[in-house]
Image (cartoon, helix red, strand yellow):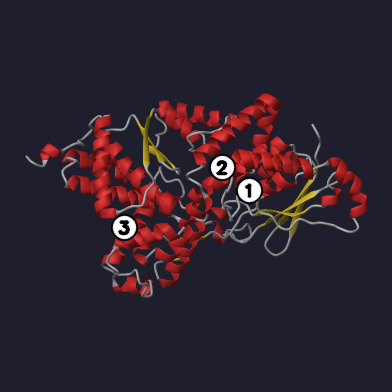
Amino acid sequence: MARRKKYIVTDHQEWSFDHISYITEQIDKINNKKYKLNIFPNQIEIVSSEQMIDAYCSVGLPIMYNHWSFGKDFIKTYESYKKGRTGLAYEMVINSNPCISYLMEDNTMVLQTLVIAHACYGHNHFFKNNYLFKEWTDPDGIIDYLLFAKKYISQCEEKHGKKKVERLLDAAHALKYHGITKYKRKPSKSEAEKQKEREEYYRKTFNEVYWTTIRKEKKEEIDRSYSLEENILYFFEKESPKLETWEREILRIVRMIAQYLYPQMKTKMLNEGFACYIHYKIMNDLYEQGYIDDGGMLEFLHHHTNVIYQPEFDSPYYSGSINPYALGFNLFRDIERVVLNPTEEDKHWFNGQDWVGSGDPLEVAKWIVENFSDESAILQFVSPKLIRDFRLFTILDDRTEENEILDSYYLISAIHNERGYKEIIKRLAHRHDINNYIPNIEVLKYDMWDMWEDGVLTLIHKVDESQKLLKLEDAERTLDHVKRLWKKDVELLIEKPGGETITYLTTYQDK
């Protein structure tokens, strides 16, 4: 009877603000006493399904400038949701200080408890402590920057026309994954101050009269080719000869937001896995302390198993990839097993690393959260047992028109032996490195002194053996956006494995 008096979360119970406030206090006590997660202050928002879809379709940020693509995604997702063809996330969490968590108003009290543990503690700790987020993001300033971006683009639409701004945003969005740099400099001034300084810099530097008068005199003395630059949006922002100041600022806004979201792409599996690992432990703690009844616990387990479910290869729900929630959660659970009860196989496989058998799985999990990305965590912590549990193997698809036999058969290139485990881990890590899905395209060269006349920009795309060639149709459409930003002819060199080079030259026509 004493246990039942403490129940605050029951099966299919409707939530209330008082219940959410109370259960959050209990979770906070559990965290302070047992887990000691280092988190930002939490800000919980209860939102409708329309508000959740709106945030989801605006790249998952609470404040965003307007663009037709966001509205298109909203209509598509909303119609699909109304017809029951798709579900919505139970929550959405923003990497900010305070950490903002959106909870769906349609959730039951069990679900609200689950997502508070998942987002407000699991994701929150990950955002604050992972080295990628600490180096590349500014949670204290992101909301202010988004407000600045929304206001600035709105002012540009009023001053220069919505159509012109829209065309520029179309081009910037087409190249947003090529607007990311690996070395993020910490901001030292407000965005408004830096924006005024950039305007003054562009006014002094990009002067057509200056370049055309000295070009012939200086060309023989200085012939500049730009060194390889992977951040193409940054290159256009600084070097494009005919962009106006406001256009450069919008390019900066798009690439800054893309840069802010980049760590999330690098840590999707690890981030979701840790959040699932934490919410699983906290929900069990709440149950043991009498805050969740048996029915509520069964409801939680139903939702939890759905989230971490990995469909079989022949299931109609199989998407062709591994569920990051499933792999991440099971990775942390397997690490806990190795920390507490390593087998002889584990000791041999991990070669006596000091975390094996150390006896404190939570500290090891925190260390992994702080220091690893998806790719590096898979390379270091995936065990043979985890590979067997997921029944992973690799297939070599080497079918050719000349080889009729291979048209009917696949070659299994890695099985469950020591050499096979290493190959499977290598391939699995490769699949979880977002850089392998973004074509490696860099600025190769341009003639700085001739850019007001011919000024051809040369880009190079290097393709290694693990990557596929660009789809020509998509490449041509993207090059149209590149020309719109450079406002001159653009040349794309595609360097295939073995040294063969394909050249595409696109001609700019001023419209």
Label 1 and label 2: CA atoms lie apart by: 12 Å
- Give the label, 2 or 3, closer to the camera: 2
Closer to viewer: mark 1 or mark 3: 1
Q: Residues within 10 Å of mark 1 (few under 14, many from 20)?
A: many
What residue would you read off at disc 2? 257
Q: CA distance from mark 2 to mark 3?
A: 33 Å
Dot 1 falls on a residue whose secondary structure is: helix
Residue 199 pos. (x, y %): 71, 39
The residue tagged 3 is 333
266 sits to left or right of 492: left
Q: Is residue 15 visible?
A: no
Question: Along the line of sight, which residue is nearer the eye, 292 or 501?
Answer: 292
Q: Please tell me which residue lies in front, 192 or 336.
A: 192
Residue at 62% in and 31% down: 153
Q: Amino acid at mark 1?
A: His
- At 40% from the left and 64% from the top, the residue drawn is 381
Question: What SS does tag 2 mark?
Answer: helix
Look at the numbered discs 2 and 3 and tell me whether their residues touch, using CB distance below 8 Å.
Answer: no
Residue at horizontal 63 percent and vertical 40 percent from the top: 193
Q: Is residue 64 above or below residue 347?
A: above
Q: In the rendered structure, which amino acid carries the disc numbered 2?
A: Ile
Q: Amino acid at mark 3?
A: Arg
Instruction: Of the two numbered discs 1 and 2 on the same chain, state the one appearing first in sequence.
Output: 1
Residue 437, x across and y down, in percent: 57, 52
Q: Which residue is mark 1?
A: 178
- Find residue 282 and report its horizontal and vertical position in percent: 26, 48
Q: Which quarter of the image is occupied by the N terminus?
A: top left
